[in-house]
Image (cartoon, grey):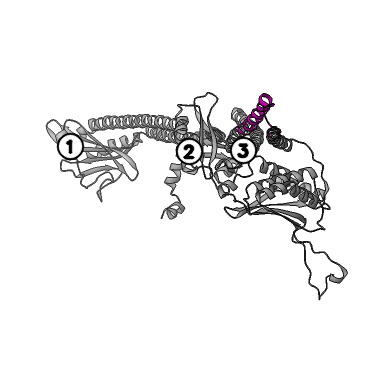
Amino acid sequence: MSSTSADAPLSWWQRLGRWWAEFSLQTKLLAAATLVVSLVMAAIAFFALNGIQADVRMSDTRFARDLGLLLSANVTPLVAEGNDRELAAVAERFWKSSRSLRYIFFADPDGIIYLGIPISGTSGGSELLLSRRLELPQDLLQRSQGPLIRQHLSPDGQVTDVFVPLVAGDRYLGVLALGINPNEAALASAALSREVTVAVFISIWVLVILGAVFNALTITQPVKELLRGVRSIATGDFEARIALPVGGELGELLEGFNDMASQLEAYNEANIEELTAAQVKQQSLIATMADGALLLDAEGRLVLVNPTARRLFRWEGRKLEGNLVSEELPEVLALELQAPLDNLLSGDKDSSDVRCSFGEPPRTLRIVLQSVRDASGESLKGIAVTIQDLTREVELNAAQSRFISNVSHELRTPLFNIKSYVETLHDLGDQLSEEDRKEFLAIANAETDRLTRLVNDVLDLSRLESDRVWAMGPVELRPAMEQTLRNYRLNAEDKGVDLQLAVDEQLPAVRGNWDLLLQVFDNLVGNALKFTAGGGSLKLTAYPWPDICTLDPSTAPSSDNPTCALTAPLPRLRVEIADSGAGISREDQQRIFERFYRVENAVHTEVGTGLGLSIVKGILEKHGSGVRMASELGVGTTFWFDLPLAQSDEDELRLELERRELA
């Protein structure tokens, strides 16, 4: 329905209304004033014309009255005497003497015309005699003392009728009727006045229309276009231009506007490029921040989220912009941040620092909220949120506290034992037997070794964390494993643990560092032996992984012989250390390779610094590998790792190490 009415052609009245609506208020007022002036002038001309015409009519009536009285004075005696011939002669001379006379009628008291000029009513008498009846006005008899004058419109024009009663003494003789043409000069003047008035009125309106059109084309239209251009510039459309062929000051104004718009457009483009570059830099900086970053608007809705925050809150692949941050955060964090966020949004505070934990396993976060205001500092534009993951720091602090506690305990115990036995030897040396002195010295020596191991572990960990470059070369792994088992064989025999070595004689060499790999075996075998009870077993195994398929002429690929392919492009040597000890719980397996962490902290059955497995992990990472484990409580534990072969490509090993570090 609406579309049909919209497509219908507009009437001329609607078009005129739209055309009139396009004019400004000033133009409308000017047109209204012109209309009022023209109407006043037309009214004045109308009244003036009416006055002129009234004067003309009055002049005509006066002339007709005087003419009627003059003729009646001359003919009344003739009518009283009945001298019709002389009456006719006088009437004819009077008729010929005036061009204004239209007719002259003489009627008796009954209204019968007996003489008329220029027509005659008789058949045999004079042409001036008539026998027709004259229709006299009703009030003529009431006006017997003076003439009756009236005007009527005939086919030949306007005529002034004069009826003069003919009275001689007290005797009523009849009526003299004259028809008089109006004054031609007066009529011409009145007609001219009327035509001039109409012409003036039409001219005024023509001037009004021309003035409105001129105003619309030369003033109103450019001003409208200029106003539209200014509004476009105000809304940010700097491409707005005005193309009108206007000269003079308006033309200069329009040219100045176009120049201004061009400069604003160029300035805007430069600003946009600068702002875009700054925004790209800012977004790149925020995106590469190690900490999470959020940007909220003045209503608490997300505007920007960097990748770190997305990973931290599991927001990958989600469109978050425009959503309330309180609806997107985990419930625990939303509750923690509700009050600080409300304080910043309401303007009560400018910054807030919140520490909270969430998730499983728990993560510790430090969330800093900072309000962002305009240059005046009055209007709140948004809130910048920085999220620092303090989980590692908290864990390190806890590990450091555990380390200090462990080291303090480990140092205090051997030092106390050493001091006690040395003091006993010093004070009671002569009173002790030789066997007691040897026993005391052996205990002091063992405690000294224990201190040495503790210090060495700390030093080893410090060396691994340094930027030292370790020399790598071909290493035969079987001798290192055999040496490790020899070092622990006596301890194994004392505990009743069976040590086994399942390694081929022709084991391929690996690329590594002899001392570091020997320390790996020492730590892993020592830990396995420490947690394996009597009657258990500890087994070391090494084998190529993936399996290597060696080919010789007799087993060359053919249609009759089966073939095998490498399952990986970089063959390695896998090493396993398996024990049948107490095993490790799943909770401890999550943290077993953390530095300073000890499984025995919960049961306090075995001593140690908690650095052994952390050192193993660091050494294997230097070799481009990693340590893994599988364990079950009451069943045992197996640690394994892969080492690159000696003939492996160094560039490929380096790239793999870099990928591992980035991961």
Residue under circle 3? Answer: 239
Cα distance in 3D space between marks 1 and 2? 66 Å
Residue under circle 1? Answer: 140
The vertical placement of 89 against 633, above or below, is above
Q: Position of residue 132 (x, y in %)?
A: 22, 47
For marks 1 and 3, the one nearer the N-term is: 1
Residue type at mark 3? Glu
Of circles 3 and 2, which is in front? 3
Q: Are marks 3 and 2 in contact (CB under 8 Å)?
A: no
Please, what is the dominant secondary structure of the magenta stretch?
helix
- Horizontal placement of 488 versus 25: left or right? right
Task: Report the span colored magenta.
Answer: 408-436
* Front in this rendered view, residue 382 or 99: 382
Q: Is residue 568 magenta?
A: no
Q: Is residue 419 magenta?
A: yes
Quarter of the image for residue 463 reads top right
Residue under circle 2? Answer: 22
Outermost residue, bottom side: 560
Residue type at mark 1? Leu
For marks 1 and 2, the one nearer the N-term is: 2
> Is residue 616 something that shows in the picture?
yes
Q: Are marks 1 and 3 in contact (CB under 8 Å)?
A: no
Circle 2 sits in a helix, a strand or a loop, which is it? loop
For marks 3 and 2, the one nearer the N-term is: 2
* Front in this rendered view, residue 547 or 266: 547
* Front in this rendered view, residue 287 or 532: 532
Circle 3 sits in a helix, a strand or a loop, which is it? loop
